[in-house]
Image (cartoon, rainbow, N blue to C red):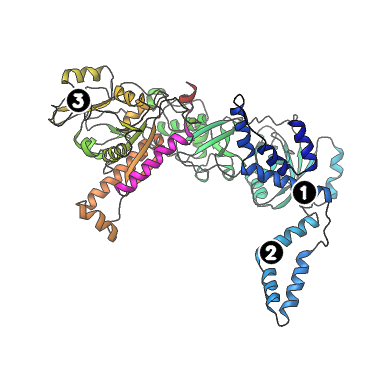
Amino acid sequence: MIESFAIMSASTGLHETLALLTSQLHPDANQKEDLVFLRNVFSEKSLSYLMKIHDKLRQYEKHSPAPVLHSASCLADDLAEELQNGALKDDERELLQLLSTPHFKAVLSAHDTVAQKNFYPVLPSLPEDVVDDLEEDSVKIVRLVKNKEPLGATIRRDEATGAIIVARIMKGGAADRSGLVHVGDELREVNGNLITHKRPDEISQILSQSQGSITLKIIPAVAEEDKLKESRLYLRALFDYTPYEDKATPCQEAGLPFKRGDILQVVSQEDTTWWQAKKVADCNLRAALIPSTQFQERRLKYRMKMGSFPATVFPKAPTYDCAEREDCDSDGGLNGKDVAAVSSKSKAGPAFCGHAFSWDFYSAGLRRSFNPRKDWPSSPAEPRTQNYNHTGLLIYEEVTQYLSRPGERPRLIVLIGSLGARISELKQKAIAENPHHLGLAVPHTTRARKCHEKEGVEYHFISRAAFEADIQNGKFIESGEYKDNLYGTSLESIHKVLNQNKVCLVDLQPEALKTLRTAEFKPYVIFVRPHIYDQRKPLGSSCSLSLGVTEEDLQEMKHSADKMDECYGHWVDYVLVKEDPASALAELQVILERVQMVPQWVPVSWVRS
């Protein structure tokens, strides 16, 4: 078959040959799987299009057509001008309209560019006053073409010699693509102007404002080999970062702004203070600067030591001045006990991001009056999945893409909701719509069973002594007391659903994620928050006030949602804004399907463990 394929390729086009070969693939019993796969590959439309393009390019190469003229645009303009000077017939009017369309003008412009072979900008000749310098082996003249994009390099002044040194080359930038500028090179002149007496920020401004051709006189570093090795480290940002608000960055224009939850690919960790990174799925090929884990950790500790913000996980990075940068660059800092997060217990209920809020404040449904016992542990175990910095500070989390394979247990789906979200109702409706694919973790309770209830359906009914023993043995994810009865969700009930190869939906308080964020469960966390209507608009009046919801209630719901997002948003994979039950249910069903079909970013420890 291979020989016949080679003979056909010589006499026919590759596209026709591929179609003929595909039609001759008749898999037998022994080779069915491989040949079916090969036939499916050959039948792909994208491959067929590529083959057609290949055939056209071969025809062009064979005939080597030459342009009739090198300025088709001028000819079209002259023709249009002639047509406009006289009375037009229908076909002449149609031709004039065709010649005036932007797309046709663009085609003619592209034709002229190819015909004139004007593919690249023409660099001017070297200035006469620098030709003599080329005789010196230590001097290199570099000519770069820069458009609107940054040059992609940062500079610094050498403290010992005072020389201007290239500090870093941004991956994918103009300097990196040229291959002519390297870390450690000494910069002497920019466009013939001596810059040794200028400050680095002045030189950066000259480079950023320059357009077109830039001529650099450089003394190469001793070793011109670029030591930057591209890494494949992917991080989820756990805080917002705006380089223009960060006075410590070496170059604000070279910084990478990002939001909490963005996935970043770190391409270089050569600089221990400022890493080079790109946003995943960003079309910009040039890397930019982000604070390294070590540097961000040091300056967060510095801020806590100075009392700038409470010693708790803080989701937004503050700005820093140069004095702070010098201090936090040192080995000083707070010890482990100084930066520990606040306890999850308080007299008013669970701690909420460093402030005590009652359980009623951020709960919904039954949990509005459902309080944990003070003498019980809040969770059976400490979290086993830590952030990338391993300190508890919210900086980065190393992640990788994951999709469950056939035979693996489904991922646990955790719903957390702020006041007014009614997540229990949403969960029940989703399970009722698809009971064969979704399952419910049946809770435990000490209250008496009602006549219509069945054991293991609505609840597992156990004695108070057995319930309290299970709490002490760490069998419950969360538990509490309501009207003198105990309620709780056990790990065993979750395992029972997952072992049936069903997707288990649980609605929990976010503190329970400390236990569940492990490789065992790989939870996908959905934050459900109610849509807060504006009471000043008619829509708000009809949809909210008519249901007995006051303006004060809406403000409390909004405050609850904002606080939950602030304190637990770094654990959330998706935010579902609930406008009405029907649309929320439809959106949830789409999310559940996507989790099972599309790779998701998860902590790398869940896959490597």
In front of the other: 373 or 17: 17
Say what secondary structure mark 1 lies in.
loop
On the picture, is 460 further left or further right than 602?
left
Closer to the eye: label 3 or 2: 3
Question: Please, is residue 68 above or below residue 405 in the view?
Answer: below
Evaluate whether residue 563 shows in this view: yes
User: Could you tell which of marks 3 and 2 lies nearer the N-terminus?
Assistant: 2
Vertical relation: 441 (above or below) 93: above
Question: What separation in Å lies between label 3 and label 2 (alpha carbons)?
Answer: 75 Å
- Chain part drawn in magenta: 579-604
**Left or right of 386, for residue 112:** right
Quarter assignment of residue 77: bottom right
Q: Disc number at residue 104?
A: 2
Amino acid type shown at disc 2: Phe
- Is the residue 510 above or below the residue 116 in the image? above
**What residue did someone put label 1 on?**
192
- The kind of residue tagged 1 is Gly
User: Of marks 2 and 1, which one's residue comes earlier in the chain?
Assistant: 2
Identify which residue is drawn at 20% across, 20% down. Answer: 467
Residue found at the very far bottom of the displayed protein: 87
Viewer-proximal residue, 459 or 279? 459
Q: Which mark is first along the chain, 1 or 3?
A: 1
Residue 560, quarter of the rendered image: top left
Query: Which residue lies under the disc numbered 3?
Result: 455
Dot 2 falls on a residue whose secondary structure is helix
Q: Position of residue 85 (x, y in %)?
A: 73, 81
